[in-house]
Amino acid sequence: MVLYPAKKIGTYDAADINYVTGYLADMVKKYNLPPKVFVLHRFTKKMVTNSQNIKLRPEVQVVMHMDGWGEPELKKGTYRHFIQSEPVQFTGFKLFYKNDLKKAPNRLMTPEELLKLTPKPIYVQYQ
């Protein structure tokens, strides 16, 4: 498969995600490791299918992470539609220093704005 960053959007099903979390859980148990954080990036509905079937495991903490470019209102809408409705376990939010500033109002969301989201993201990434 040829990947085209920012051109072709992939899809993962709950079965794929369960395979990976199972693998991580086995490693945690085998090597007596602390729980692992598994971050799933999402900015469209089709990026993660059958999310209601994602199996939660005590060895893996699943973060459904809003990962899209744009102005604050667009990003909040994406969070509402694709994260808030299917949070799985924990939620996250990504801010882009360059790409979020390409269009008006040309500003990053503030920490206070992020904490007003429901559910509150526990993982915030700046890139």
Image (tube, rainbow, N blue to C red):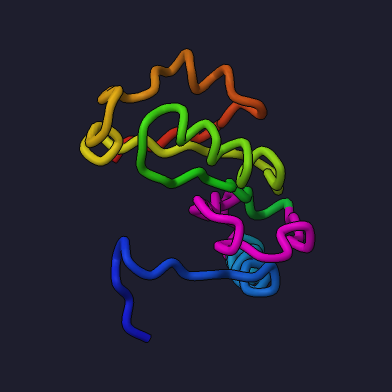
Q: Residue 25 at x, y = what percent?
A: 65, 63
The magenta stretch is 31-57
Instruction: Using the rendered image of the protein, determine whether residue 30 is visible from the camera's viewpoint.
Output: no
Q: On screen, 8 above or below 124?
A: below
Q: Residue at x 53, y 38 (%)?
A: 92
Is 17 colored magenta in this rendering?
Answer: no
Q: On screen, 69 above or below 103?
A: below
Query: Of residues 79 and 111, which is closer to you in this image?
Result: 79
Q: Residue at x 56, y 31 (%)?
A: 121
Is 46 colored magenta in this rendering?
Answer: yes
Query: Of residues 41 and 100, which is closer to you in this image?
Result: 100
Kindly give the residue lying farthest to the top in the view shown.
Answer: 112
Q: Residue 115 at x, y = what percent?
A: 54, 19
Q: Quadrant of residue 72?
A: top left
Q: Residue at x 37, y 31 (%)?
A: 71
Instruction: Using the rendered image of the protein, determine whether residue 49 is visible from the camera's viewpoint.
Output: yes
Q: Quadrant of the C terminus?
A: top left
Left or right of 47? Residue 106 is left
Q: Residue at x 54, y 55 (%)?
A: 44
Query: Of residues 124 and 29, which is closer to you in this image?
Result: 124
Q: Residue 94 at x, y = what percent?
A: 41, 39
